[in-house]
Image: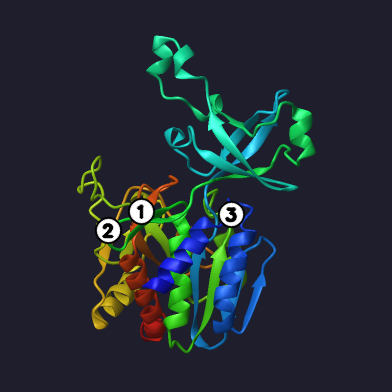
Amino acid sequence: MSDIKTLLEKLSNAHGISGWEGSVQEIVKEEIAPYVDEVHLDKLGNLIGIKKGEKPSIMLEAHADEIGLMVKQVDEKGFLRFIRIGGWFDQTLLNQRVIVHTRSGPITGVIGCKPPHVMKDEERKKIIEGKDMFIDIGCVSDKEAEAIGVFVGTPISIDRTFASLQGDRVTGKAFDNRAGLVAMIEALKRTSSKSTIYAVATVQEEVGLKGAKVAAFGLDPDVAIASDVTIPGDHPGIDKKDAPIEMGKGPVVVVADASGRGIMASPQVIEWMVGTAREFGIAVQLEASDGGTTDATSIYLTKSGIPTGVISMATRYIHSPVEVLSLSDVDRAADLMARCLETAKKYF
């Protein structure tokens, strides 16, 4: 699994918030180019690799973007106020180091707030909200900040790098969804499928499943697989009755998410994925959740409908800078996707 670890580290350490996925897309392009017949970007920025073949045509998809921040205001003393891009829990933001991606290049900043030493008792008891935080880049005026290329709309990402834990477990930022990209890339490398395959790294998932909708409309595949991460219930603070998935127990086949407001995978799709896992001896977990959803929701509602399934990997502390997963889950998810690409013609 050393290749998976190396690639996940490279992608996790890359910076690409929603709408600014270019540096991530360059890595994906380099990885998939030898395994497809052509690669291009569509008008929204989705990276699409096409491997020409037979029916059914299959869209293999993972989103490239990560949650981040954006400059809302540069005040007269050079401090930056920001908006959140994607779903942040404000407590994870405070005192983080960030990278501000200016027109002149990346610079470092830190997220601060009013010091607790000067807070009143009732203030200390409250959760500090993002609107009360600011970013300190060391400037002393708005003019100085503007001179180095900081303006309203400048994207900001978290400054956190990949690290190994014990066993095959690793931690880093943006495993949601760089892990999905790794599984997609590895599946493309491992498969012997004769079908037409569209390997798509989509944009702007974290802000409304936007890229997948556009890509699916343009490609109009016969069937699709979305690769993403999901929440396990195997650590303190969460009950298994609320999230029965476990890290290290294999890839997750999603039956339904967001209490059915998201994807509702058809029996045909579930039989395809679970039947393939059974045929090749790949242990899988099934999930029906009331949490969030994935790009699959946009894909399967495109045009007259596209049969779509989700293969996910259990990942702890999603939407934080310290997400944790098991490399073996990524490896087995890639295997399941690769085999599903090969068996699709039996089911569709």
Residue located at (41% from left, 55% from top): 163
Determine whether 82 is above or below 236 in the image.
above
Question: Label 2 belongs to which residue?
Answer: 247
Q: Is residue 24 left or right of residue 322?
A: right
Q: Amino acid at mark 1?
A: Val
Q: Nearer the viewer, mark 1 or mark 2?
A: 1
Q: What distance separates the C-alpha of mark 3 from that of mark 2?
A: 26 Å
Vertical position of residue 187 compared to residue 144: above or below: below
- Residue to which mark 1 is pinned: 324
Q: Nearest the camera: 101 or 167?
A: 167
The amino acid pointed to by label 3 is Gly
Q: Residue at the spot x=47%, y=68% of the render?
A: 7
Above or below: residue 145 compared with residue 177: above
Disc on the earlier residue, 3 or 2:
3
- Picture quadrant where residue 266 is located: bottom left
Give the spatial CA distance, label 1 vs label 2.
9 Å
Q: Nearer the viewer, residue 19 or 105?
A: 105
Mark nearer the N terminus (1 vs 2):
2
Q: Where residue 221 sits in the image (x, y, percent)?
A: 53, 75
- Give yes or no for contact between labels 1 and 2 (Cβ–Cβ under 8 Å): yes
